[in-house]
Amino acid sequence: MKKITLSLIVFVCIFSNAKALETIENDTTVYFKNKTIQIEDSIGQMKVKVLGLDGEEYKPVYEGVFSDGKSFEKWTVMEEIGIQLPFMTKSKSKRKYTMEPHWAGIGWGFANIADQQYNFNNINGVSLKSESSNEFFFNLIEKTLPVYKNNLGITTGLGFNWRNYYFDSNQYFAELNGVTVVQDAPTGTVYEYSRLRTHYITIPLLLEWQPTFGASQKFFISAGVIGGINTLASQKLKYKDQNDNTIRKTVGKGLNIAPVTLDFQGQIGYGSWNIYAKYSPFSIFQSQKGPEIRSVSVGAMLNF
């Protein structure tokens, strides 16, 4: 069928472009819409070549040799020069996307505290400097499991999180009878800063949606929980003594930080960038051993 159809096309082109023919004995060349059709007819054999103009040079598109009932046909660069034949139409295949998780990377945000009623800052006697309190995290390992095509999947991984809470007042945390409480600075002492730092190893469980818009799958939304294991907690105080000497005091025990934590997280992004928000339904401190304050944070992240 290909041979018959091609032959019909070639001869239609010849007769419809009779003025463009250059005939040298039995050889014929036809110029048709930036295409060159060469026909070489000899005894017992006919060659047909089709070349298409690509820039300043012609590239071969088709070559057929018909001889003694046998034939040889070769097709090349069909799509590049735009020849469209009914029997050569290729069905367009949809591009296959590979779902990529958005956990690995680095992020920074503002940290604060809240209570059960979602009131922020100045909670249970703890008031923070919102502009100074911060969160930094570094996520190294990620893995996603697609659950619907390559648009919806579950992401997990491993990361590290640091949070710094700076007191807005001249106060610090102290342990009294096994309970962490807020204390005023000793008389005559003015803290340059009073900071609580926590460090966690984090493991997420996030549901991520990556819709496909045309040829792009860069937009994404994810939500879920992040579990944290506390590995370090410390309080650092900086002030000057009566002799104007700078004192830096670090306390790493007796803070009663909860050994594990859990955050709800939502994030939205495009490409390698996203913004996120976190809220913990549990207190930073162990139950009945410290102020009932919960961690919240908002920030931005650069994914690897």
Image (spheres, grey):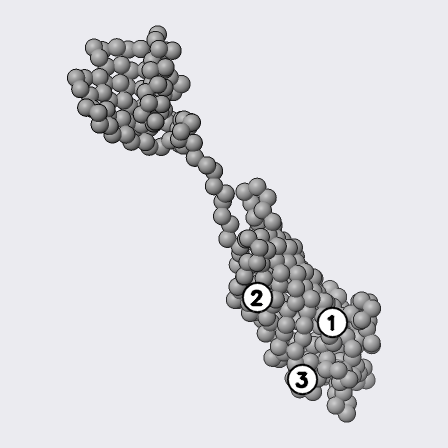
Tell me if residue 53 comes above or below residue 19 in the rendering. below
Q: Nearer the viewer, mark 3 or mark 1?
A: 1
Residue 57 in which image quadrant:
top left
Amino acid type, label 1:
Pro
Residue highlighted by disc 2:
156
Residues at marks 3 and 1, CA–CA distance in whole angstroms: 26 Å
Q: What residue sits 36% from the left and 15% below the top?
A: 12
Q: What number is the disc on residue 128?
A: none
Badge 3 element: strand
The quarter in which the N terminus is drawn is top left
Q: Earlier in the sequence, mark 2 or mark 1?
A: 2
| Mark 3 Cα-neighbour bin, 10 Å: few <14, some 14–19, many ≥20 | some
Residue 154 in which image quadrant:
bottom right
Tally of numbered discs: 3
Could you say which is closer to the camera, residue 265 or residue 224?
224
Residue highlighted by disc 3:
251
Q: What residue sits 61% from the left and 66% below the top?
A: 205
Badge 2 element: strand
Q: Evaluate whether residue 229 shows in this view.
A: yes
Q: Evaluate whether residue 185 shows in this view.
A: no
Residue 280 in which image quadrant:
bottom right
Residue highlighted by disc 1:
281
Q: Is residue 291 left or right of residue 163?
A: right
Q: What residue sits 77% from the left and 75% below the top?
A: 293
Residues at marks 2 and 1, CA–CA distance in whole angstroms: 20 Å
Amino acid type, label 2:
Thr
